[in-house]
Amino acid sequence: MSRIKLYLDEDAQRTDLIQALRARHIDVLTVSEANFLGQPDDFHLQFATEQDRVIFTFNRGDFFRLHTEWLKNEHHHAGIIVSEQVGTGIVVRRLLHLIDSKEATEMQDWLEFLGNWS
């Protein structure tokens, strides 16, 4: 089983979230760690895909649009998880449920709404 690895965009790179995920042995890379602060969303999606990482974001509108455009233009991505702004504990619980339930390969070209993982 190929485990989902995450790439947290600028909106999602909250210190408490990163620490909580890493404490649970989730492979996390942030925009800051990759030295890509200020890059456009499509750049981050491309980078995440090249790194076989699923991008995690609170930026629902822009990444929904990007997902739609990429599929329309037959571009592939490693996956997108979008979430509403809720508490860190809720986000971590939902992400762990998703990561324990899906393989990385199942996320390819997929947009997942984290709110579905209560």
Image (tube, grey):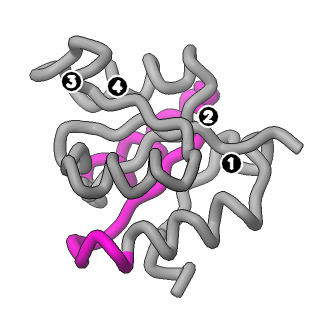
Q: Residues within 10 Å of mark 4 (few under 14, many from 20)?
A: many
Circle nearer the N terminus (3, 1): 3
Are discs 4 and 2 less than 8 Å apart at CB?
no
Q: Is residue 65 above or below residue 20?
A: above
Circle nearer the N terminus (2, 3): 3
- Per the rendered image, the range of residues in magenta is 62-90
The residue located at (27%, 31%) in the rendering is: 41
Are discs 2 and 3 less than 8 Å apart at CB?
no
C-alpha gap between disc 2 and disc 1: 6 Å
Q: Secondary structure at mark 4?
A: helix
Mark 2 vs mark 3: in front? 3
Mark 1 belongs to which amino acid?
Answer: Met
Circle nearer the N terminus (4, 1): 4
C-alpha gap between disc 4 and disc 2: 11 Å
Are discs 2 and 1 less than 8 Å apart at CB?
yes
Mark 4 belongs to which amino acid?
Answer: His
Mark 3 vs mark 1: in front? 3
Instruction: Residue under label 4, please give it.
Output: 44
Which disc, if any, is residue 32?
3
Instruction: Residue under label 1, please give it.
Output: 107
Given the current orientation, which residue lies at the most extreme left position?
38
The residue located at (55%, 24%) in the rendering is: 49
Q: Is residue 116 above or below residue 114?
A: below
Is residue 49 something that shows in the picture?
A: yes
Instruction: Residue under label 2, please give it.
Output: 78
Give residue 42's position: percent from left, percent from top: 33, 26
C-alpha gap between disc 4 and disc 3: 11 Å
Q: Is residue 58 above or below residue 70?
A: below
Mark 2 belongs to which amino acid?
Answer: Ala
